[in-house]
Image (spheres, grey):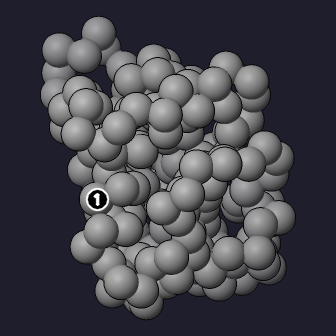
């Protein structure tokens, strides 16, 4: 696995022993399918109770809650963009998701954080483009935040893993910008 504090893994984000996990949430923050549903199930009903107090979350932003029954102490909920051919600001919105998550990680002093492939499931974001944005933002976060030492991208299938491997193999100065 490439160094610089970035790792790839397969499996279930809800089982990772990290300080924070990221939830690819919907705007309501009240649970849903995919990783969102898995995180809500794993955390237990207290997560939904806390999420109801947050008033939702706009696309590109993030909110933080306790992890409750999860191994992670914190869940950072972020709302990625729905892919609409890249003409409605999707790259910048996705980059803002990561920046918002890293900002909360810094504020809460998290040393380790795990991300799903935000927006690449039912929201339809192309995996390779999303992975490039995720890796670029992760590299920038590691360079700016001396507390953060470990960023894990959890790949839910081989196509996602391949997209992240390709993005990690690119030198940081050659990645396309969002």
Image vertical order of residue 33 relative to residue 100, above or below: above
Q: Is residue 146 visible?
A: yes
Q: Would residue 17 appear left or right of 18 to someone viewing this image?
A: right
112 relative to 11, above or below: below
Identify which residue is drawn at 82% across, 47% down: 11
**How many numbered discs?**
1
Residue 142: percent from the left, percent from the top? Answer: 37, 68
Residue 161 sits in which quadrant? Answer: top right
- Say which residue appears at 52% left-offset and 82% top-offset: 111
State the residue lying farthest toward the bottom.
109
The residue that mark 1 highlights is: 140
Q: Which sits in the foreground, 104 or 129?
A: 129
Residue positioned 31% across, 43% down in the render? 172
Residue 155 in the image: x percent, y percent?
69, 39
Q: Residues within 10 Å of mark 1 (few under 14, many from 20)?
A: some
> Is 88 left or right of 94, judged from the image as shown?
left
* Residue 14 lies in quadrant: bottom right
Residue 120 in the figure: left or right of residue 41: left
List x then y, in percent, for residue 149: 51, 76
Q: Position of residue 130 (x, y in %)?
A: 42, 30
Relative to residue 39, is residue 123 depicted above or below?
A: above
Quadrant, the C terminus? top left
Helix, strand or loop status at disc 1: helix
**Residue 23 visible:** no
In this rendered view, identify the residue nearer to me: 89 or 31. Answer: 89
Identify which residue is drawn at 30% across, 68% down: 143
**The one of 23 and 15 positioned closer to us in this rendering:** 15
């Amino acid at each position: 696995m490439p160094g610089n504090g970035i790792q790839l893994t397969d499996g279930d984000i809800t089982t990772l022993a990290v300080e924070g996990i990221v939830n690819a949430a919907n705007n309501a923050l009240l649970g849903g399918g995919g990783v969102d549903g898995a995180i809500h199930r794993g955390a237990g009903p207290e997560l939904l109770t806390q999420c109801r107090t947050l008033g939702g979350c706009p696309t590109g932003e993030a909110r933080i809650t306790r992890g409750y029954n999860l191994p992670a102490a914190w869940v950072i909920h972020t709302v990625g963009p729905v892919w609409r051919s890249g003409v409605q600001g999707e790259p910048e919105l996705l980059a803002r998701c990561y920046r918002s998550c890293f900002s909360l990680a810094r504020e809460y002093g998290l040393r380790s954080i795990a991300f799903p492939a935000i927006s690449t499931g039912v929201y339809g974001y192309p995996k390779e483009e999303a992975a490039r944005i995720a890796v670029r933002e992760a590299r920038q976060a590691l360079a700016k935040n001396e507390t953060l030492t470990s960023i894990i991208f959890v790949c839910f299938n081989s196509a996602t893993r391949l997209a992240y491997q390709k993005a990690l193999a690119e030198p940081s100065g050659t990645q396309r910008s969002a």
